[in-house]
Image (cartoon, rainbow, N blue to C red):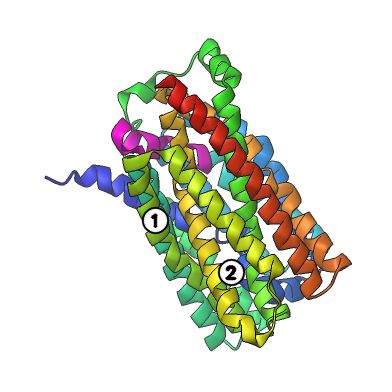
Amino acid sequence: MIDIRRWTIMMILCLTGGLIYLLPFMREIYYLPLQEALDLTNVEFGTLMTAFGITSMLTYGPGGWLADRYSPRLLITISMIFTGLGGLVFATFPSYTVALLIHAFWGITVTGTYWGAMIKATRAWGSEEEQGRAFGILEGGRGIVEAIATTAFLGLFAYLGSTRSGLSQIIIYYSISNITLGIAAWLVMDSRKVTSEQAIPPTASEIFEVLKRRDVWLIAIVIFTGYSAYWGSFYLTPYATDVMLMSVVVGGMIGAGKNWLRPFAAGAAGYVADKIGITKTVSFCFIILIASFSALGILPADAAMLPIVLTSMTIGFLGIFALRGIYFALISEVKIPIAVTGTAAGVLSVIGFTPDIFMPLIGGAFLDAMPGEEGYRYFFLFIAGICVIGWVATRLLLKRVKAAN
């Protein structure tokens, strides 16, 4: 018999997790239109995400602490509503300073009050034998939501003439969607903790034990490098328009279309991870990413190479979404107690998601210093090098998992 409440929780996690990131990460699909609407250079545009990244880094730890003490219902509701309110202000295309403040504010609402709650709720949703599947379903579900939303809104943007005012309307629709889901989370989700184990806050000694574990720091490196690759994928849309000379709408279709790969990649990775091991699956994902970004950095960007370039992009997207779908499941494979899951997720996220701070600046610096194809080429090779570090960390982690078993 289907546990309706259990699947309702997962549905809310997928819906909110799929939509809450669309506002701060609009640049992924609307890079050039949004940059022009705000009248910013590549570096200034990248600095917006740096502001988001700094406040995110500062609130991952406190956010994990909150997740170990308060219900997902409360934290998710607060996050969605306030993220949407920030979006309504951003829709006016404010000054550079105000735009920076909004992105910094989003770092708090998307990270401090939402992220840890989502991770802990997902960990508790699945049994210890289903952690790969639980996180894979979450990432896949978020991918479906994001794919539907981005495709629909991109179509609406094209219908509105791809204008500045049209982009403002899209931001407003994103914002209203967030606020509506926040209200829905409050009405649908249970106010209690997801499991009775979560009702017991972690002790100081338990938190300290988490911080001492070497495998926790290896997982942090895995997330750090995998998330850097995810940031690298943001530049595939402007690459398509700037270098491959595709239209803004077609470039946006690549950004939106890739999200349709996300459910398949994350779901398949979760299933495979439960069969052969999470760490082994993560290792294979890094091999895929190294190959993909290396190819993009080497292949000439001319019309004759378009099919191969698009294939490399597709393979890279699959590897990224597969990796994102399961890397937090490593928490279970190294047997971190569920009572400190929020705290562990906070520690991992502080390190793992620091690319939010520097990757936009690095990407902008590459493109401003070497305009055109050359800048993208060196940037993609830089991402491939980071993925090599991730693969090495994964192999070291695999040795520790085998030794422990």
State which region is magenta.
114-131
Quadrant including the C terminus: top left
Residue beneath disc 2: 171
Taking depth in this image into account, of 173 and 346 the one nearest to the observer is 346
* Residue 130 image-quadrant placement: top left
Number of the label disc, if any, that sits on residue 289: none
Quadrant including the N terminus: top left
Q: Residue furthest top?
A: 205
Q: Is residue 120 magenta?
A: yes
Q: Is residue 68 left or right of residue 254?
A: left
Above or below residue 63? Residue 18 is below
Neighbours of disc 1 within 10 Å: few (<14), some (14-19), many (20+) = many
Q: Amino acid at mark 1?
A: Gly
Q: Residue furthest left?
A: 1
Q: Amino acid at mark 2?
A: Ile
Residue beneath disc 1: 140
- Locate residue 110, reporting x and y percent: 57, 47
